[in-house]
Amino acid sequence: MFISGQVPEKPDGSVPEGFEAQCEQAWRNIIAVLAAAGLGVEHLVKITTFLTDRSQVVANRAVRRKMLQGNEPASTVMIAETVDGKWLLEIEAIAAE
């Protein structure tokens, strides 16, 4: 399953303040997409994270490890500008059974 870029917006359209909160929200969105397909984080095989600043790399790694609960899919991190300036990151993923 290919999961298109998930941004740090809550279902009500609001965006959390701060990088860690936004990162956790983007992961919650990915986890929700996985759950809707009957899958979990253990099914992730590849993730690509787009960060808006190099200074976010360490925090991104910490949040990713917490949200993935020990699962370590292949991962690429890129520094890029997001479509909406309030988003500090975007995450896309590939999952397989």
Image (spheres, rainbow, N blue to C red):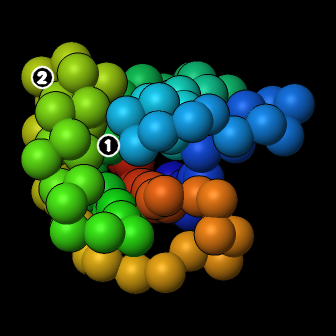
Locate the C terminus and report the quarter of the image it occupies.
Answer: top left
Count of numbered circles on the image: 2
- Work out how far the residue at label 2 is from the one at label 1, CA to CA, in angstroms: 12 Å
Residue 60 placement, left or right of 15? left
Q: Which mark is residue 85?
A: none
Residue lying farthest to the right in this orientation: 12
Residue located at (12% from left, 47% from top):
58
Q: Residues within 10 Å of mark 1 (few under 14, many from 20)?
A: many
Q: Is residue 57 above or below residue 23?
A: below
Residue located at (47% from left, 30% from top):
21
Specify the quadrant of the image occupied by residue 40: top left
As helix, strand or loop, the secondary structure at mark 1 comes to: strand
Residue located at (25% from left, 36% from top):
64
Residue 70 placement, left or right of 33? left
Residue 4 placement, left or right of 84? left
Q: Which mark is residue 44?
A: 1
Task: Give the residue type that dot 1 points to.
Answer: Leu
Q: Is residue 48 above or below residue 78?
A: above
Q: Which mark is residue 70?
A: 2
Front residue of 53/27: it is 53
Q: Is residue 70 above or below residue 44?
A: above
Q: Position of residue 56 (x, y in %)?
A: 24, 55
Task: Give the residue type that dot 2 points to.
Answer: Gly
Specify the quadrant of the image occupied by residue 59: top left
Task: Give the foreground label among 2 and 1.
Answer: 2
Q: Residues within 10 Å of mark 2 (few under 14, many from 20)?
A: few
